[in-house]
Amino acid sequence: KNEVEQSPQNLTAQEGEFITINCSYSVGISALHWLQQHPGGGIVSLFMLSSGKKKHGRLIATINIQEKHSSLHITASHPRDSAVYICALPRSQGNLIFGKGTKLSVKP
Amino acid sequence: DADVTQTPRNRITKTGKRIMLECSQTKGHDRMYWYRQDPGLGLRLIYYSFDVKDINKGEISDGYSVSRQAQAKFSLSLESAIPNQTALYFCATSEGTNSNQPQHFGDGTRLSIL
């Protein structure tokens, strides 16, 4: 079983919809990363959080350390939000272990 | 200019060839990583380096080697490429000794081995 599980694997939404992507993990962590991979392949870091909630523009990330669960929300989704969203956990060597990603497609 | 630069961006080559993927960074970070991404599998760690003299294998290092020529440069080599090494390769950096640091990724190298 993967240490990091994401759901759903694929998500299609209409522009303006509220989006939720979930991440569950089975190992102890002190923080969790959300990453965005653009259709061209590049990866950018969206959030790193260890408790509660963080917000950046229309993106909100929450984490519940006790339940080993995090969610990424997108409000008022837009076609430019179409990307793969990846949940990742830091390991002691500093590297990340990654979920398989959620491919989001937002239709106009 | 990008903080983490990978070259080449795309490469097509034949089985048995030696290939080098290069990564350079201007962020001044000590830690550098090479990952590969395969469809449906997510990214996996190939090698990582804490500084020029500290290089370590990741979970899928077989068939690969690395060189940390300077703090800013970390190269990945495939000594004799095989088709199942066809993948998207990413270099990443992070700073400090705290494992809870954001990682900064290059734009990736798409490698196809025929």
Image (cartoon, coloured by chain):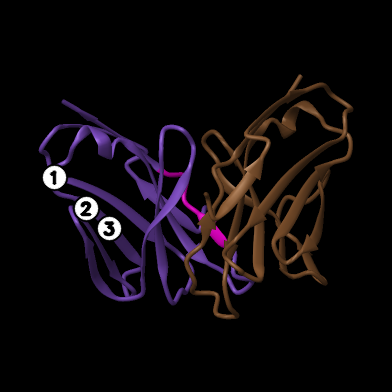
Task: Give the Cα separation between the discs numbered 3 and 2.
Answer: 6 Å
Query: Is residue A99 inside the magenta stretch?
Result: yes
In this view, A87 is above or below A78 = below
Asked if residue A59 lies left or right of residue B16, the reply is left
Residue drawn 18% across the image and 37% down it: A78
Crowd tier of the residue under label 2, counting other residues whose Cα lies within 10 Å: few below 14, some 14–19, many 20 or above: some
Asked which secondary structure carries label 1, the reply is: loop
Quarter occupied by residue B20 = top right
Quarter occupied by residue B19 = top right
The residue carrying mark 3 is A71
Q: Who is closer to the viewer here, B72 or A53?
A: B72
Q: Who is closer to the viewer here, A3 or B18?
A: B18
The residue carrying mark 1 is A18
Give me the chain that's brown: B
The chain under label 2 reads A
Could you say where residue B47 lies in the image, as x and y percent from the top left? 73, 57
* Residue interval drawn in magenta: A96-101
Which amino acid type is shown beneath numbered disc 3?
A: Ser
Q: Say yes or no: labels 3 and 2 on the same chain.
A: yes
Give me the chain that's purple: A
Mark 3–mark 2 CB contact (< 8 Å): yes
Which callout, 3 or 2, points to the residue nearer the camera?
2
Query: Is residue A19 inside the magenta stretch?
Result: no
Residue A73 marker: 2
Task: Give the Cα separation between the discs numbered 3 and 1.
Answer: 13 Å
